Structures are given as C-alpha cells and as structure tokens.
C-alpha cells in the first residue's frame, strides 16, 4: 500500500488529483479528472448525435432516390407502348414459367419418390424373407440371431450405406429392438408402429420421417418402410439426402432455364414491338411537326405491309392538309385584304357624306316638313353607327393580319375602371341601371395598353347595360401577386345553354329579333377577346338563363408573362347552385 500512497502524494504535490478509493470500493474523481470525464461524455454524445443525423440524411437520400426511380419508371411505363408490352410479357411469362416449374418439380419429385418407395418395398420383402429363414434356422438357445440378422441385412446395403435396418420382437415388452449404426429407436414413427400392430400379418407400410442417431451425427430426412412377419417387425430406413440433392439441382436448373426463357421472351417481345412502335413513333413525330406548322413533313415508306400503308396514308393526309391550309390562307388573306381595302376606301365618301349629314342635322329645325328633320336625325345616327362599324372592321382586320401591337405602360386598374364607368354612366341611367363598384383599397398596378383595356371595359359595360334589364351592374376589381382581374356582373336575361361558346363570335346576337338600342356593331366582344389575348390574358364568360351573366377580364401584371390564374372567381358568389354555363376562352386557344 505504500507504493500507491506515495504516488498519490507525489501527484498531489504536482497539483493534480488522483482517484481516491474509499471503504465502499467506489472510485471518486475531482478537479481536472472530473472535467475531462465530462468532456469525454459530451464528446461521445455529440459524436452519437452526428452519427444519427448522418444516418437520417442517408436514409432520406435513399428514399428520394427510390421515389425518383419509381416515378421515372412509372412515367416511362405510362408513356411507352414498348415498355408496357415488354413489362406485361415479363410478368405473364414469369407467372407461366413459375406455374410450369412448380408442376414439373412436383412430377419429378413424385416420380423420384415413387421409384424410391418401390425399391424400398422390394428390399423390405427380401429382408422379411431373410428374417423367416434365419428364424427357422436358429436354435432355441441362440437368442442373438436377431442381431446377426440385422448385421447381415445391413451388409447388403454396400459400403455407401444406402439404408439402415431396425428389427423388433413384439413379444418382448422390456427389450428394445436391434438397429444398425447407432440408430435411435425414436426414428421409427409411432404411427407407423401402431399401423403395423393393427394390420394383418404380411402387411407393408411406409412413411416419411426424421432419422436420428445416438452419436452426434446430424439428423436427416428419410423414407421409412416396415412390415411384419410373425411376431417380428422389420423396418428399413432410407436417407433421402441424395434424392433431396437431386431435387435441389433439378430445381436450380429449372429456375435458371426459366429465368433465361423469361428474358428471351422479353427480348423477343421488345424486338417485335420495336418493329411496330418505331413507325408509330415516326408518325407521331411527323404529326407533331405538322401541328407546329411544318406542312412539308412526310414519312418514309418502306415495303408494302400495314405500316407502309400507314405511312402512305399519313403522307396523303399531310399533302391534302397542306393544300387545304394553303387554300384557306389564301382565302383568308383575300378576305382580310378585302375588308381592309373596303374599310379604307369607304372613308373618303363617308367623310363627304358626314359633312353633308352634319349640315342637314344642324338645320333640321328650319325645314318646313317635319319628316325631313326626322330623316336628318336618322341619317346622323346611322352614320355614327357606320363609322363605328368601319373602325371595328379596321381593328379586327389588324388583329387578323397580326399587325396589332401593344403599347404597354404601368397603370392602376382602378383608375381605368373609374374612367370607363364615368363614360357610360349616362347610358346606364337612361336604362335604369345602377353601377356598383367593388374596388380594393390598394393599387392594382399592371403593364397594360390603356386604349385597349378601356375599349374592353367599355364593351363589357355597354353589353351589361344593354342586357341587364335595368338591374344593378356590379364591377369588381381584384389583384394578386401575378395578375389583375375585372369582373362585370349583370342580372339580366343571362346566357342559354350553348350560347356561351358563341358569345365572342363576330356579329353574334343572343336574340336576333332584339333591337339594338345602344348602336353596337356586333364586333365589340370579338375585339375585346383579341385585345385580351394580345395582353396574354383571358376574357371569360359565365351565365345562367334568368340569373344574369358575368364577364371576367384577367391580365398578367407584367406584360408578356404567363397567366396561371385569376384573382377573381368566374362564377359569382351564390350563383353556383344551379348548373352553370362556362365559356372559358383563354389566350392562345
């Protein structure tokens, strides 16, 4: 004890602490030793936490990879006919091969076991005959003849030991039977012994069981056949290790052959479908190029089979389509040029007629015949309508020719709505309608063409006044991060089923017999839709018979940006109980 104590004193002199062993046997520490122990504990805990985070990140990355692979595979399977056919062939052929493999394995196993049972029964018959001969030749004093008989029967199995033998005298209640190679008596199933005991003399029986030995050899599965001759029961126990090995080899061979066969079938299916899918893919690519405007696209024709006929039919269709589209383009160009030329040529005589009509209108009160004054007023109104029609025709011809341009500037949509509502306020009062504004408190800024947006709003408001039946007209403005919207709601006759698709057609009227009281040209909504599409926006309509209608203008905040949604609903709140009629006409449709 003096050695450790001296060492402790030296350490104390150096200013360090050492463990102190108390009477209880516990070791205590203080000072730097305790601090270093806490540091080691905290360092170990930090290392464990880092390891857990690393494991979680690894598992998360693995899950993402698996999900991405599965998603990519499903997308590939859904979009490719060849992949679906090959996958289906793999799946179906695998099932068929598995069923055939199980059936063949059962047949091979049954045939192998049946042959084994027949050979075992023949061996048992020979053994029973040998037992009878040995019993007849044994003397009364020789009580060990059963042991010698067992050894003699075992010797017939050869050096490889094809079977084990067990014999028992049923009259001996306290003496067990005789077995070879330290075979346990428990290897003989009790049910087989009971079957032979209750069976008549000369009966044979067999079963399968487990062969166990007195020494440390492992147990093994085997075939056990037994029979009776007089008071003696004789059992042959055949290990099935060789047969099991044979069945295992056969199963592996069949599995290998099955896998190769399935892969060959998949390869054949891939090759066959490839010959069909490639022309279809070429046809699809050609159709996409045709849809993109490449009307000269043609397919290569090879052979005279069905695919060759498909290629020729596709080429004929493309040629006819190119010819018809060319004819329609020429006709459309002629029509646009005719409208433009007529509109321009009519302006000169219209100006002269306008001057004369203004003079007659200003002096209408000086005519002696009141009918002449009334005719001057009618001439003045119809000339105004004719001028509006010419202006609209020129505008629609510019849209048709693709010559319309956008003069965008950043504006507050609330100011545009207020200005447009002020312009049609007198018309609304004459019709007995009241315009109700629902404007947000914050500015709704967007890059728009002032002239075109004001024209859209004017057309929508005039249309609402004309068909509003004197009811209130609600104008709503909304905005979100990407878009602004204006909705004009009336409570008039609404739109009948099927009319929603025609409301933006040129010169279309909901009721042909209804007289126009506001002097419209029939092109206002068509031009409004073109103006909305020029902004990259939407002009959409909703309506129900007797419940009124609502038109919604949605525009991107930034000119040229893609519009993904609208900040205002198309169906007014409370108007969606009945089945609504939608007419959603988006830019680019």
Image: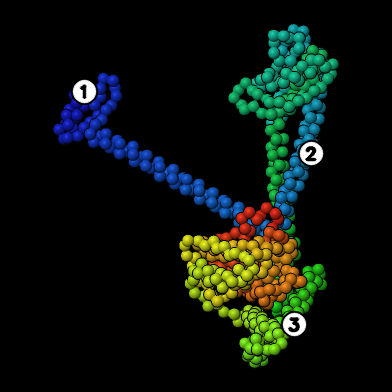
Image-quadrant location for residue 175: top right
First of labels 1, 2 by sequence position = 1
First of labels 3, 1 by sequence position = 1
What residue lies at 68% left-to-right and 73% top-to-bottom? 517
What residue sits right under mark 3 in the picture? 327
Image-quadrant location for residue 331: bottom right
What residue lies at 62% left-to-right and 21% top-to-bottom? 214
**Mark 3 or 1: the one toward you:** 3
First of labels 2, 3 by sequence position = 2
* In this view, 97 is above or below 124: below
Q: Position of residue 553 (x, y in %)?
A: 59, 67
Q: Quadrant of the N terminus?
A: top left
* In this view, 216 is above or below 377: above
What residue lies at 58% left-to-right and 54% top-to-bottom? 69
Q: Nearer the viewer, residue 1 or 73?
A: 73
Q: CA distance from mark 1 to mark 2?
A: 83 Å
Q: Which mark is residue 277?
A: none
- Residues at discs 2 and 3 in contact (Cβ within 8 Å): no
Q: Position of residue 64 (x, y in %)?
A: 54, 51
Image-quadrant location for residue 232: top right
Q: Nearer the viewer, residue 284 or 129?
A: 284
What residue sits right under mark 2 in the picture? 107
Label 3 secondary element: helix
Residue 279 visible within the image = no
Q: Which mark is residue 1?
A: 1
């Amino acid at each position: 004890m003096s050695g450790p104590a001296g060492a402790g004193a030296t350490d104390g002199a150096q200013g360090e602490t050492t463990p102190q062993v108390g009477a209880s046997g516990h070791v205590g520490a203080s000072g730097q030793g305790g601090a270093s122990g806490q540091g080691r504990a905290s360092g170990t805990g930090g290392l464990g936490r880092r390891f857990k985070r690393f494991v979680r990140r690894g598992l998360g990355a693995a899950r993402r990879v698996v999900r991405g692979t599965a998603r990519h595979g499903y997308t590939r399977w859904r979009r490719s006919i060849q992949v679906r056919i090959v996958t289906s062939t793999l799946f179906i052929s695998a099932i068929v091969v598995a069923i055939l493999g199980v059936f063949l394995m059962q047949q091979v196993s049954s045939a192998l076991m049946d042959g084994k049972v027949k050979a075992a029964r023949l061996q048992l018959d020979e053994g029973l005959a040998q037992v009878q001969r040995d019993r007849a030749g044994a003397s009364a004093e020789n009580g060990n003849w059963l042991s010698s008989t067992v050894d003699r029967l075992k010797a017939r199995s050869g050096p490889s030991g094809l079977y084990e033998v067990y014999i028992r005298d049923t009259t001996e209640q306290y003496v067990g039977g005789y077995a070879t190679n330290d075979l346990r008596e428990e290897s003989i199933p009790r049910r087989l012994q009971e079957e032979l005991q209750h069976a008549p003399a000369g009966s044979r029986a067999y079963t399968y069981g487990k062969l166990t030995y007195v020494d440390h050899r492992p147990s093994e599965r085997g075939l056990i056949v037994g029979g009776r001759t007089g008071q003696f029961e004789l059992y042959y126990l055949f290990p099935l290790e060789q047969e099991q090995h044979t069945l295992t080899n056969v199963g592996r061979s069949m599995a290998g052959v099955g896998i190769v066969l399935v892969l060959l079938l998949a390869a054949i299916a891939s090759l066959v479908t490839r010959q069909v899918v490639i022309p279809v893919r070429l046809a699809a690519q050609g159709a996409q190029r045709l849809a993109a405007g490449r009307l000269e696209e043609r397919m290569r024709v090879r052979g005279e089979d069905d695919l060759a006929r498909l290629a020729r039919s596709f080429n004929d269709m493309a040629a006819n389509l190119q010819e018809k589209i060319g004819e329609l383009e020429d006709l459309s160009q002629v029509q646009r040029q005719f409208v433009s030329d007529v509109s321009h040529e009519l302006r000169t005589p219209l100006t002269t007629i306008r001057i004369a009509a203004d003079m007659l209108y200003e002096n209408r009160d000086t005519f002696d015949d009141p009918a002449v004054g009334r005719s001057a007023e009618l001439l003045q109104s119809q000339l105004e309508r004719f001028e509006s029609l010419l202006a609209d025709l020129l505008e629609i011809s510019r849209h048709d020719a693709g010559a319309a341009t956008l003069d965008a500037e950043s504006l507050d949509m609330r100011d545009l709505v207020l200005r447009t509502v002020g312009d049609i306020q007198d018309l609304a009062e004459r019709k007995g309608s009241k315009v109700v504004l629902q404007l947000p408190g914050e500015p709704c800024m967007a890059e728009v063409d002032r002239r075109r947006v004001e024209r859209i709003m004017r057309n929508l408001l005039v249309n609402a006044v004309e068909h509003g039946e004197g009811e209130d007209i609600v104008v709503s403005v909304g905005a979100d991060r990407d878009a602004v919207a204006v909705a004009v709601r009336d409570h008039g006759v609404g739109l009948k089923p099927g009319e929603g698709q025609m409301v933006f057609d040129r010169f279309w009227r909901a009721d042909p017999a209804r007289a126009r009281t506001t002097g419209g040209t029939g092109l206002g909504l068509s031009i409004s839709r073109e103006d909305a599409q020029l902004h990259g926006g939407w002009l959409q309509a909703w309506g129900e018979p007797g419940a009124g209608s609502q038109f919604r203008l949605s525009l991107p905040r930034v000119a040229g940006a893609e519009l993904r949604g609208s900040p205002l609903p198309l169906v007014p709140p409370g108007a969606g109980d009945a089945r609504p009629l939608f007419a959603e006409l988006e830019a680019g449709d």
